[in-house]
Image: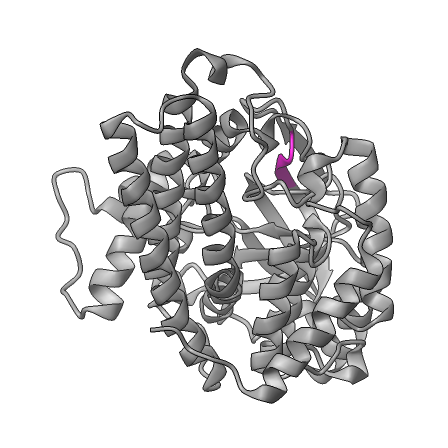
Amino acid sequence: MDPTYSPDAEAYRAKIAAFLDEHLPAGFTGLGSMEADEARAFAAEWRTTLHANRLLAASWPAEYGGGGLSELEQVILAEEFYRAGAPMGTENDTFGIQMVGNTILQWGTDEQKAHFLPRILSGEDLWCQGYSEPNAGSDLGNVGTRATLDGDEWVIEGQKIWTSAGHLANWIFVLARTDADVVKHKGITFLLVPMDQEGVEVRPIRMMTGDSEFNEVFFTGARTSVDNVVGGVNNGWSVAMTLLGYERGEAAATFPIMFRTEIDRLIALAGESGRGDDPVIRQRIAAAYSRVEVMRFLGMRTLTKFLAGGHPGPDASIFKLFWSEHHKVTTELAIDILGPEAMVPSGRWPMSSFHTDQPGAANSSASWAGSFMVARAGTIYAGTSQVQRNIIGEMVLGLPKEPAGPRGTWRELQGQTA
């Protein structure tokens, strides 16, 4: 299957390609090739350029500062940006635009849209995600952070963990339990909470890559207005699932391109290292290439649904499971090809995949060794591979819920050990 685009679509592709040629520096290959300070400066300037040309949130209605693009134009935009190695925003825009912004567009009130969406695009509001907890990792139904109504405000008590960019954000979208007397998934509310207040404490977590992009966030009497509930009280589970779908939706268009580039560099690495004639290495590279082709077809199926106006559903778990497991074994292969050289912090052959399109990517996370370490997290964040398989089994295939063992169900164990 090799679908073709309409002439109008190809004309729009040419327009985006011309925009990139005009605005990107000559020889640009991505932020991963830059030093951290240079990358941050370029990313900030590039974001301003995208905003001025209504390409920062290209699918949003023009009344909120977006570009009003069609679904097909969004796909073409993402494809061309990734081919050029151009970021579609900063790291925080993943949370502000792709996640909470798109969710507010679908679930928010007119007042919430009018207030928050322009501030997201201007950069006045920087967002982070308050989902995971020490006892509610991939099983969000175990959320223990509580919100209690006090007049016209919710008072929040609890803890979140693995909060990316929490040290930079001034707003956080939080899943909090607002009713403990109903089935656990039904008593959760999606709240928008200001972080610049007493009662919110952020503590950084140092990772094995040397970075500290993750944080713990503690709420002790933190407050937010009743007007900052998205999707209705005790309906947070449905809102949260929508957000996770948006988190995975764009990946269907961009990840196959990204991973195909990674395979090309893996082949080059094997040749440069003199391992291209190793029969085992050759077999493993061929298997990796085959997985990327499968990923491309999975992406086409997801995009077909998206272009037909469908919303993200549980079948998005198939793509998430596939790419995260692929990236883990592919970076393991790169380390095996490098051998002892993989132990050098900078590694070799900077990659264009995960985290290398963000400021600061010129450090270890841009190398094969850094990507190897980052890839492990891909099978955990946004739902572990085990939980994705459960979702596929129960919600896609219609299989019965998993039976409880002597220590409980897998989901319960995930909640206890996350």
What is the span of residues highlighted in magenta in the rendered image?
212-218
Which quarter of the figure is the N terminus placed in? bottom left
- Which is more toward the observer, 276 or 363? 276
What is the tally of numbered marks visible in this picture? 0
Residue 204 in the image: state x and y as whole percent.
Answer: 66, 30
**Is residue 327 placed above or below 184 in the rendered structure?**
above
- Which is more toward the observer, 364 or 19? 19
Q: Residue at x 69, y 74 (%)?
A: 14
Residue 193 in the image: state x and y as whole percent.
Answer: 70, 57
Q: Residue at x 50, y 34 (%)?
A: 374
Residue 215 in the image: state x and y as whole percent.
Answer: 62, 35
Residue 293 in the image: state x and y as whole percent.
Answer: 34, 57
Q: Residue furthest top?
A: 340
Question: Dividing the picture into quarters, in which one does residue 147 lie?
Answer: bottom right
Q: Residue at x 45, y 86 (%)?
A: 308
Task: Report if residue 98 lies within the magenta region.
Answer: no
Question: Dividing the picture into quarters, in which one does residue 49 lie?
Answer: bottom right
Majority secondary structure of magenta residues: strand
Residue 30 in sight from this viewpoint: yes
Which colour style is shown? one colour
Is 334 positioned to the left or the right of 12 in the image?
Answer: left
Question: Dividing the picture into quarters, in which one does residue 78 lie?
Answer: bottom right
Is 29 positioned to the left or the right of 46 in the image?
Answer: left
Which quarter of the figure is the C terminus placed in? top left
- Which is more toward the observer, 55 or 150? 55
- Which is more toward the observer, 342 or 54? 342
Residue 152 in sight from this viewpoint: no
**Is residue 156 placed above or below 329 in the rendered structure?**
below
